[in-house]
Image (spheres, rainbow, N blue to C red):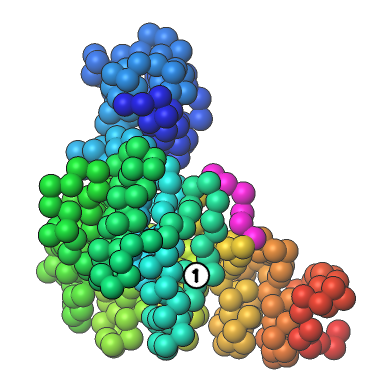
Amino acid sequence: MTNREMKFLGGRMKQLREKNGIKSLESMRELLTASGKEEYRVDNKSTLSRSESGSAGEKTIVKWAKAYCAVFGYSEKQTEQFLRGDKIAVPDTSALLKNPQLIDELGEEYNIVVIPDVVIRELSGIKNSSSGKLEKNAREIIKGIGYGDRVIEMNYNGDKSIVNDEQIIAVAKTAAEKYGCEVQIITDDADYSAFLKGDEAVTALRLREYMITKQKLVNMKGLVELDNYYADDYSDLAAPDKYEINAFLPDGNTLIISAIRNQSHSFEQRKAKIKWLIDNGADVDKRDCYHRYFPPLTHAIQMNEYEIFIFLLKECHADPNVGSRNPYDAGKLRQREKNEGNMPLMVAAWDGRIEFVKALCNDKRTSINQQDANGFTALIKACANGYRKCRDILLEAGADKKSLTLMIRLMKIGITSTLNWDV
């Protein structure tokens, strides 16, 4: 293991500790010692400090990295992935279309994320020639890619007549040679095994397997089967454990969100499934890690599912103040480019969903004047798109007119010109 790899692994140990709410090394020392395993006994926290900084020996860093994984309940597969060291991820087009936020997630776990130029070309072709969900996803992915030290684009300079999968592999091999470390191609449906047979530097990781490594999961196949199962009654169905029932599916949605968005089944069947999930420990407020990091309430608004929305709000007691936020980025400041903090009321006001705005304003829990990461309120969003009825409902509910001064400033500098209000 190189010095760079040891520093990378040490940094991941620190991230794992902090994401699990252990703020200090002394608290981590006590947690390890309290586990009851003699090999986890730590007499001096400086051992952990040197491991997290990457300045200890390789065996020491690996030992404590495994111990961290054990006390936080990581499975053997998750631990193996955690210890991967300084590896590079190369997402292919199929994986990105399945989970448009995948680059953000890979950037949190891999030292470098390489985007092959052929993937960008494929996405651009889909954006320009398709319609519906595929076109929307391709547009979101291209728009959201931020290149820098961690995310880079790499060109394929060989024979352009070969298939795209082979071009992606060629880029992955170039990255392995350039950076001197292993590369994993993240894919959803392509079979790279024939091309990669015997290759030690480049391997393929299915998106489903990658999602398993990100959470306490033991049976992703069973989870997908449950996602596809709908019935009038679920009382005889064995529930997943508390980790699986809140797990992310391969597309980044939760089981609850997937049920909300699946309009091919009746309201009653979806309602029964959501209630069964919640009764068995599913979090009614858990955000997706797929599109905009929205909670279930916001997904119901987007799908114009008013009955499901009211069911979630009133019977399931969903929190109306849960804003969008990357579930794997909870320790960072809110990101303006991702419009974090976008609450259900803001989304409803922006889309002019009058009944949804009315229901949220009538709920005493709703924070009417909350701002998103850009400083926008629900009132600003309603006015920006000219939705006067939504504006009136918000004003009657106590929306602060002063928030509109921000919109006026934006108009003056040309950012928006669609303000419609008479207040």
Tally the numbered discs.
1
Mark 1 is surrounded, within 10 Å at the Cα level, by few (under 14), some (14 to 19) or many (20 or more) other residues, namely: some
Q: Is residue 22 above or below residue 46?
A: below
Depth check, front residue: 279 or 390:
390
Q: Which residue is mark 1?
A: 142
In this rendering, is residue 403 above or below 110?
A: below
Q: Which part of the image, by quadrant, shows the C terminus? A: bottom right
- Could you tell me residue 320's position as x and y percent? 55, 68
Residue 333 part of the magenta-drawn span: yes
Q: Which residue is more in the foreground, 110 or 217? A: 110
Residue 378 lies, in percent from the top left, at 68, 74
Residue 379: quarter of image: bottom right
Residue positioned 85% across, 73% down in the render? 413
Quarter holding residue 368: bottom right
Please give left or right for residue 292 compared with residue 70 in the image: right
Q: At 40% from the left edge and 21% from the top edge, which residue is drawn?
A: 51
40 horizontally vs 128: left or right: left
Q: Say whether residue 223 is visible.
A: yes
| Type of amino acid under label 1 | Ile
Give the main secondary structure of the magenta stretch. Answer: loop
Please report the residue visible at 22 percent of the width from the left and 50 percent of the height from the top.
203
Q: Nearer the viewer, residue 83 or 294?
A: 83
Residue 80 image position (x, y, % from top left): 24, 38
Looking at this view, name the residue that lies furthest to the top: 43
Q: Which residues are magenta?
A: 330-336
Q: Quadrant of residue 389?
A: bottom right
Which residue is pictured at 42% across the width and 73% down the height? 121
Q: Is residue 186 visible?
A: no
Residue in front for this viewpoint, 359 or 170? 170
Quadrant of the snapshot with the N terminus: top left
